[in-house]
Structure formats: C-alpha cells, structure tokens
Image: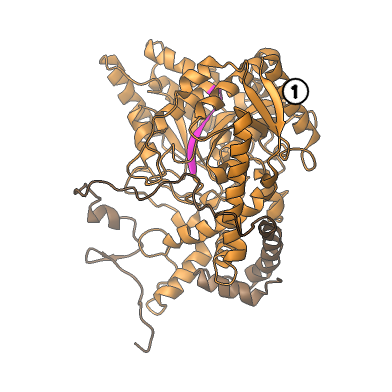
Amino acid sequence: MSDLLRTDAAELSGLLAEKQLSARELTQASLEQIERVDSAVKAFLHVDAARALASAEAIDARRMAGEELGPLAGIPLAMKDIFTMTGAPTTCGSRILEGWVPPYNSTITDKVLAAGIVVLGKTNMDEFAMGSSTENSGYFTTHNPWDLDRIPGGSGGGSAAALAAFEAPLALGTDTGGSIRQPAAVTATVGVKPTYGATSRYGVVAMASSLDTPGPCARTVLDAALLHQVIAGWDPRDSTSINAAVPDVVAAAKHAEVKGLKIAVVRELGGDGYAPGVLQRFNEALAVLAELGAEITEVSCPNFDYALSAYYLIMPSEVSSNLARFDAMRYGLRVGDDGVNSVEDVMNLTRGAGFGAEVKRRIIIGTYALSSGYYDAYYGSAQKVRTLITQDFDAAFASADVLVSPTTPTTAFKIGERVDDPLAMYKADLCTIPSNLAGNCAISVPVGLSPDDGLPVGFQIMAPAMADDRLYRVGAALEQALTDRWGGRLLDQLVASPAGAYLNGGAR
Amino acid sequence: MALTAKEVARLGELARIRLTDSELEQLAPQLDVILTAVARVSEVAATDVPPTSHAMALINVFREDVVQPSLTPEAVLAGAPSVGDGRFRVPRILGEEA
C-alpha cells in the first residue's frame, strides 16, 4: 500500500500545493486501493475511475497554469449514495432507484466539485439511510475493515469503511439518527453531524426532513474540519438552511485546546446495556481530557431515556410522507404496468417489490402513528418529548461547554446478529439520537480498542447549535493526546496487524 | 394493542405497499413489539408541554419572485419509466366503470 494512502488530507494538501504530488498520482493510488481491497470490504456501489482521473487531471492542469486552488483541490473523496450527482447513478441503496441517473447535483455535490475535490464514486448504505449496519442495503452488505465478519455501522457504513480501508482520505455522509457518528465509532474514523440546517439538504434524498443532516467523514479531526468548511453554509434552495456564518472549524481543530473548558458527562448515556470495554475506554478518554486541563462534571438529562421512542415515531412519520414520492410515475422502478392494472395497483406492486423490509416497516409504523385516533398518543406525544429533550440540552449547556458520552453502546456487532431483532438494531443509535431531535451538533472520535474484543470505540462530543467549532477543538485535543500516547493512529495499528494485512495486499 | 395481519395489510394499502402473506405474518408481531416500546412517550408527554416539529424555529422563508433557470423537459423525462409525447406516460387512473 502506497504511503500516500495513509497520509492525511491536510498533509496531502500541502504536497499538492507545492507540486510535489499530482492529483492524478493521488487519485490513481486511491483507485488501486479500491481495486485491491473493495472485493472484501465492499464499500462502493459505484466507482467511476475514468471520471475521477479526468477531474484529477483537470485540477493538475489548473494548478500548473498558476491558478490559486482551495485546500482540498485534488483530494479524493467517497460520496454516500444519497447525494445526487449528474453522470452517475444515485440509488440510495434501494432497488427502487436502481440505475437512476439524477438530472441535477445536490448543493453539497456542487460545493465539493467547485472545491476541486475528486469524487471516486458512491458508497454503500442502508436503503434510504434506514439502518445501523448496511445490512438493509438493497445491493450488498459492507464489511468492517477491522473484522470482515462484522458490520461497518450504518447507514453510512460504506463511507466509513472506505476511510478505514484507506480507499479514500475523505468521505461524505448524512446523519438522521447517528448514520455518520455510529459508523465512525465502529471503524476508528471521525464523523461529524453538524448543526441541523448548517449543511444543505438540497439534492440529498430525504429520509426524515426535520432530522436529516449531511456532514463530513474523515480519518482525522482536522481533515473533517477542512471538509466541513467546504460543504457548510447557507443555501437559498433549502428552506431550513441557516443564514449565518459558519464557525471557523478549521481554526478550532488547529487550536485543539481544552484548558478550563467545562465538559459534562451525560449520566443517562452509560451504565446498563453498555459494553464494559466501551465504558473503560470512554472513562480513560475523560481522564485524558482532565489531564489536559478540562473541568469534568456530570449532568442529568432525564428525558434522553425517551429519545429512542420519540425518534422511532417522528422519523417513521416523516419517512411515510417523504417516501410517497416513489410512486413509479416519474422516475425509478415501475412494476405491473400491463395495460390492465390501475395506477394504484402499479404503485402498490412497485413499492411492494422495490422497497426492502426495513423501509416497509418504517413506512407502515409512520402510517399508523399518523392515522386518526392514534395521532395524539403517538406522533403528538413524540413531538412533546422532542421539546423535553431540547430543554434538557438547554439546561445542560447552561453549565457546560460540551457534553460527552460513548458514541454507541457496543463495538461493531457480527453481520447477521441483529437482523431479525429491529429493536436491538435501533439501540445502536441510543446515544446519537438526542442531538438529531434537538438539532445541535456532535462528533465521534476514536478513543482506542475495546479490551473486550480489540475493536474500535468512539467518543461522542455534543455542542450547542451553531457551536460546531467546539466539537473540533475538543476532538482535536483528545485525538492529539491519544495519538501521542499510542505512538500513532489506531488505523495504523490495523495496517500493522495480521487482521489488516489484506490492506497492504497481503493474504486474508 | 396486538395488530393483526389483516390490519397490517390495510395499513400497507394506505401506504401503497402490496405486502405478501409471509411479509404480513412477519410484520404484524414485529410492529407490535416496536409500537409497544415507543408508546413510552406518553409517560412524559404532559398536556402543558408544547410540541416541537422542528429543532430550529424558522418561519416562511421567501425568495425574490424572479424567474430562475430550471431543468429542461428532456432532462426531467430522462429517468421516467415510460414517456409519450413529451409527457410522463402513466397507467389508467380511472376505474373500470368510469
């Protein structure tokens, strides 16, 4: 494996700017790694090598012509297959959109392309972003680079696995209940859910519109900040986009200082149901932050105990409405159009054939929760819980700068282990959901391998809405202290271990 | 609450999803477990708590009423399952008796 593949985007940026490295050479290295390992990892649904090389060459030509380029120009990126991009299929992991080529770019796609970032392809995900393992993908399951028998998290398991397998230094995700942070936690990568509305949803296939938040995925906190800076900002084409300046997340990641900062542990996000090894690494990371001069306290957010229940009413309700657009009329699959069946029959048959089990489950829960007679008890109550959770956050942030918890209660579970138990699967998002309901921002950073099973553990930092810079400041400080302690990054340990030999082209 | 397969089939039709018998058999007990678990929200949802539909309070975002470029008809129709005369071709929309 080329050393280039293990190099951070921030460092690659310098090499490219100094013309010590070409975007073509770098893109070629990523494509070769995909060739080498993706038959085992299965992170990508679609790779377009010719397009990636052509855009890399265009960047090189502009740089040679003396043009001033952005810091990420020429850096390869893996894009979750939920962002529309012309000239390539967007499936959202669903058979109902198989082969669909969108007629327009998402705002974030436009921003990424305008920054000169080289898109390698589209990554696998749970169908319509519904899941915590990629096992709900309509195509195949992505494997965790740390242990190929385990899940890479979800829904953005493809993006996280592409980073951990060194197929790309940057990736994009979306986080509705934890789909960026939980995959980051189980793969020892970094994932950020920005403040809701700080990143545009225009052209991002909708799951639950009041929760969906696109965000950056990377191997380091600074790299995530560099990508955050590119994709965030007001978009007049998204009516829920926030018209305010993006906090300087790159400066915050470079500042990396926690002295005097008040960090509060959320009491409700720990204890029973959490793996001992996860809690051990979490507590060790807290001790590191205390050594760096942070003030560690504990806070209670009693209504967080109801977050998962509220989420599994609000999200399916919005899903049942949003996914009504897949009606077999304007794009996507159409089944049973035999000249006899009515339009309703064709819709029923198409959606019955085109949607997978989890998508059907959620649409039906949403239909039930919104039906007359049940609306107040289910959807109405869930909306009240959403208020209570926001109040818990407000009270906690009155006495703390950031809140912390494990990102997810366990390490990566085995493929197949939870497929028949939806509630067990949903619990993977126990700690991440509150921030989606309240709209504030959160990050997951790796804090070591669990002594239970040798698999990665993620540490979640939550900050108030529009204070995304705090995530990067605390995340980078923690990352720096832990990397010093370990004598290198966790992912470098994977590459050096027998389990990671395949990443270097060795036998599995 | 115990949802029956018949009730799930009815919800499926409301949601425009044709479910097979084996799907109905699997879904009914699963939905029961999930709905029982999520019903906990009513424990804390007192009448004096205002509902939140959206985390960030924004109201009526408008733009200037000026013509903006849009997709061409060809681009819009390119992904359609069936097209005729520059339009989406759809199955019959009226019942037999119409």
Residue A361 x %, y %: 60, 61
The total of numbered circles placed on residues is 1
What stretch of residues is rendered in magenta? A213-221
Callout 1 secondary element: helix
Image location (x, y in percent) of residue B25:
68, 70
Res. A145 visible in picture: no
User: Farthest residue toward the left?
Assistant: B67
* Chain drawn orange in the picture: A
- Can you give x and y, in whole percent of width and height, for residue B47 in the image? 61, 60
Residue at the far front in the pictured view: B48
Which chain identifier belongs to the brown chain?
A: B
Asked whether residue A207 is drawn in magenta, I would say no
> Where in the figure is residue B38, as x and y percent of width and height?
67, 58
Q: Which of A42 and A302 is in front in this view?
A: A302
Give the residue displayed 21% in from the left and 50% down from the top.
B65
Q: Classify residue A107 as left or right of residue A323.
A: left
Q: Which residue is painted at 33% across and 30% down in the image? A: A114
In the figure, residue A347 lies in which quadrant?
A: bottom left
Residue to which mark 1 is pinned: A284
Label 1: how many Cα within 10 Å (few below 14, some 14–19, many 20+): some
**Would residue A270 be found to the left or right of residue A83 on screen?**
right
- Observer able to see residue A321: yes
Where's the N terminus of chain A, which quadrant? top right
Task: Give the position of the C terminus of chain A as an image quadrant.
Answer: top right
Q: Residue at x 62, y 64 (%)?
A: A377
